Structures are given as structure tokens and as C-alpha cells.
Image (cartoon, helix red, strand yellow):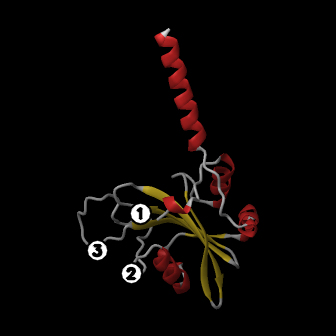
Amino acid sequence: MNRIVTSTAIGILFLGGAITAVAAVEHLPVDVRAAFEQTSNFESIRSVSVIPESVRVTFASAVRDGPFAMAEPGAKWQATDAVVEKNLPWRRLQAGAVSPELLVLFYEHGGIGHSYHVCVFRVTPDGAQLVWRAIRPKAAVNLDDLNRAIRSGAVDDDLKNIF
């Protein structure tokens, strides 16, 4: 009897864990979601150097950094909480995408918990506005992968879990 009860309890706990592991994207604006589906409207970004100054300022403010600091893809950065080299950025660009209205950054965040993020900015001649941010799966580094991850519930845009 104890074995049955224990197996049932483990099954319920596992099922409960599986249910809570699926995140709902709740803060993604409808127009941005629709833009993501039009991947042909976006061009790839592969370098921090092409990120506009208005996005850099907005990003730094949103993550409460002083000046904007993000390592180039493949460059040294502060991946863990064990500081080996001072002055390395805590974030590293993996990829990005830009359309006439939006700029998307896929980046890693180091520290005690290495995590993968996406953030989206609406860019106008007057500046940049952060319109959405989320924690994403490691493999989602382009809009096609991000769209699949959003549909599967693998993206978490609960603001208390981000940055």
C-alpha cells in the first residue's frame, strides 16, 4: 500500500512540476507578436557595434547598469559569479534581428545563474522604447526558434524573473 501511495504522490508531484514548467507569455504586445511571424521583415545582427545608441541607453537603464555593457558574440564576458577578470560585462550578445520598427536582442546573462534572454525595442527617430523582455531557451537565438519557444510555453516573460 505504501508503495502505491508513494508512486501516486511522486506522479502527482511530477505532473505538477511539468504543469508549472510551462510558462505563459502574458506581456508580449499583439503587434510585436504579429511582427515576429513576419521573419522576412528582419535582418540579422551579429555585432554589438550595430546596436543604436538609443537602444544602448534604454537597455542600460532597464537593467539598471551604468553605461551600456555587452560583450560581442564569442568574446570574453563574466559568465559566472566567480570574477576572474575585472571589468568584463555580465551580458553577451548571441544574436539579434532588426526590422524598420523593431530591434530584437538575444543575449546571455552571467552571474550566479547563467540565463538566456530576449528583449525587444521599438526604435524611432526620437529614440528607443523597451516593449518586451523574456527569459528564453538557450537554443532560441533567432525569430523562428523564438516563435516555436513561445508557442510551446518555453518562454517566460514574468517581469519578476527577468534581468
Label 2, residues with CA under 10 Å away: few <14, some 14-19, many ≥20: few
Q: Mark 3 points at which residue?
A: 87
User: Which residue of the protein is positioned furthest toward the bottom in this rendering?
Assistant: 126
Mark nearer the viewer, 1 or 3 = 3
- The correct choice, above or below, for 110 with respect to 51 in the image is above
Mark nearer the viewer, 2 or 1 = 2
Residue 9 placement (x, y as % from top left):
52, 23
Q: Name the residue under label 2.
A: 66
- For this view, does 95 lie left or right of residue 70? right
Residue at 68%, 70% (x, y): give it. 42
Label 1, residues with CA under 10 Å away: few <14, some 14-19, many ≥20: few
| Residue type, label 3 | Asn
Residue 53 placement (x, y as % from top left):
52, 85
User: Which residue of the protein is positioned furthest toward the top in this rendering?
Assistant: 1
Mark nearer the viewer, 2 or 3 = 2
- The correct choice, above or below, for 157 with respect to 149 in the image is below
Q: How far apart are marks 2 and 3 (CA)?
A: 12 Å
Question: In front: 42, or 127?
Answer: 127
| Residue type, label 1 | Gly
Could you say which disc has been placed on residue 145 in the image?
none
Residue at 70%, 78% (x, y): give it. 101
Could you say which disc has been placed on residue 74 in the image?
1
| Residue type, label 2 | Gly
Which of marks 1 and 2 precedes in the sequence?
2
Question: In front: 135, or 41?
Answer: 135
Q: Helix, strand, or loop for circle 3?
A: loop
Q: Helix, strand, or loop for circle 2?
A: loop
- For this view, does 125 lie left or right of residue 95? right
